[in-house]
Image (cartoon, rainbow, N blue to C red):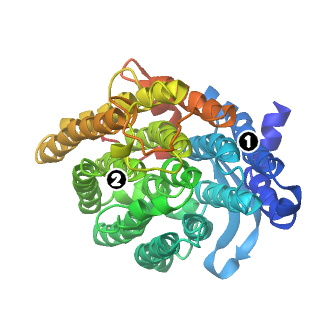
Amino acid sequence: MRMTEFFIRNIWLIILLPALGTVFLHFFGRRIGEPLAGWIASSMIGGSFLIGLIAAIPLFQGGAEPQVVRVFDWIPALGATVEFLWDPLAALMVLVVAGVGAVIHVYAIGYMRGDDRFGRFFVYLNLFATSMLILVLANNFAVLFVGWELVGLCSYLLISFWYVRPSAAAAGKKAFIVNRIGDFGFLIGLMIIFATFGTLSYTTVLDDPGKLLGAGAATAVGLLLLVGATGKSAQLPLYVWLPDAMEGPTPVSALIHAATMVTAGVFMIARTSAIYALSDTASIVVATIGALTAFFAATIAMAQSDIKRVLAYSTISQLGYMFLGVGSAAYVAGVFHLMTHAFFKALLFLGAGAVIHAMSDEQNIFKMGGLWSKMKTTGITMVIATLAISGIPPFAGFWSKDEILGTVFNRGGWWIVLWAIGLITAGLTAFYMTRWFVLTFLGEPRWEEGVHPHEAPKVMTIPLMVLAVLATVGGLINTPFRAGLEHFLEPSFEGVGLAGEPGG
């Protein structure tokens, strides 16, 4: 118990470990070389996961109060201090970011083997994880914004990691610029919050925003925050950077799509749920953008031939489901889908990376086929991931997607239109993911001459197995029979009307 209390009082250690890994590898990564640099980076983010797990024990047991850990005063004029909030929502996000991030780090040791900039890659990977952990642990909008911007910087560094390719350099710049557009709206929203409350502290702003924020102002703030979220989480109309982000190494794609950057917008809306609860208009816009993006991206995914671009558009589509969830006040369902999506999307990208690795960098699924017999472990894990994202019971995606659609349906009225869009999109998802799997693993081989497919090394397949287990059973923590996550996250949404709950 003493260890638990120590880690809660010093929750900043979760951020410090990967930050130390970043600094250490920046100076010594090249000298250490591979694979040790990769293992050091992996142990740092793995340590963050363990600290988060231990610190979350009182929250798992129930009844524990959210804790605010103050580190130092930063900008007194803005009422901005460097302080971190440890509550169920922060704990869940830390476990997802650090847990899935650690698995991706280990996989990257095998994937990046032989790369000239092996050490530099893990510098950026640790920095990416550090940035996201700052974002999810922040207890005020100023610290959140620091993490928000650092995540954007890291995406630029990693998407354009192989910058000698003109397409990679262009993709990195595109991601950076598009996100600046979104961040402009986000920043204006923060200015209105500061002008209204005189502080950027969550404690003051989010405990009872209705005291100072009228419905009109809440709508304005909610829509401006949404502009930032559409950039980070690749929703209409700012989705255009994410498909091009495939130019980065595959572990980067997995980290961006599963554990870090694109989930930031969903998390931010969930964290500011008290503001959205004051404005039906802002909430409806969030849900509508989510539903339309989910459908739009799914239709594009059906026509893709690149093994990673199919998954990129599927990410945009699944993020649309999360926006539909949080926009319909199903905040727990939206965060639940964020978690299950992290499991199966990381698995899909890492599996795609194993295929690309085995096929001598070929990414066209029409030039694959017949890989099941050559890559049995990867193939089995991809079956699980495909079933999970398609919403087939009892895999993880079924429970979270079903909860979102069920909540939207129960709201009745014109929400039925959004429910229908979500339901149709679920069918499209099953279609394009089945197409993706069949063209890649089944049928006759369509390989180019000189290609000799082979199973990936254990350092790459073991992470696939870990994620496959999570994609299989991860949804069981929140089912109609046992709403464990619902009860766990309740303190983070206390006082906010939740759809499907009394008074919601």
Q: Residue at x 51, y 71 (%)?
A: 172
Relative side of 447 to 474, left or right:
left
Q: Earlier in the sequence, mark 2 or mark 1?
A: 1
Circle 1 sits in a helix, a strand or a loop, which is it? Answer: helix
Circle 2 sits in a helix, a strand or a loop, which is it? Answer: helix
- The N terminus - image quarter: top right
Q: Which of label 2 and label 1 is nearer to you?
A: 2
Q: Is residue 213 above or below residue 356?
A: below
Q: Is residue 380 above or below residue 240?
A: above
Q: CA distance from mark 2 to mark 1?
A: 29 Å
Measured as percent of width and height from the top left, residue 292 is found at: 22, 55
Q: Is residue 108 visible?
A: yes
Which residue lies under the disc numbered 2?
A: 313
Q: Is residue 470 above or below residue 366?
A: above
Which residue lies under the disc numbered 1?
A: 46
Q: How many marks?
A: 2
Q: Nearer the viewer, residue 313 or 398?
A: 313
Q: Is residue 241 above or below residue 321?
A: below
Measured as percent of width and height from the top left, residue 207 is found at: 50, 56
Q: Is residue 474 visible?
A: no
* Mark 2 Cα shell of 10 Å, populated few (<14), some (14-19), many (≥20): many
Type of amino acid at the residue the image marks with label 1: Gly
Q: Residue at x 47, y 24 (%)?
A: 373
Type of amino acid at the residue the image marks with label 2: Tyr
Q: Nearer the viewer, residue 348 or 91?
A: 348
Residue at far top of view: 481
- The C terminus - image quarter: top left
* Mark 1 Cα shell of 10 Å, populated few (<14), some (14-19), many (≥20): many
Relative side of 437 to 173, left or right:
left
Determine which quarter of the picture holds residue 480: top left
Determine which quarter of the picture holds residue 156: bottom right
Relative side of 490 to 239, left or right:
right
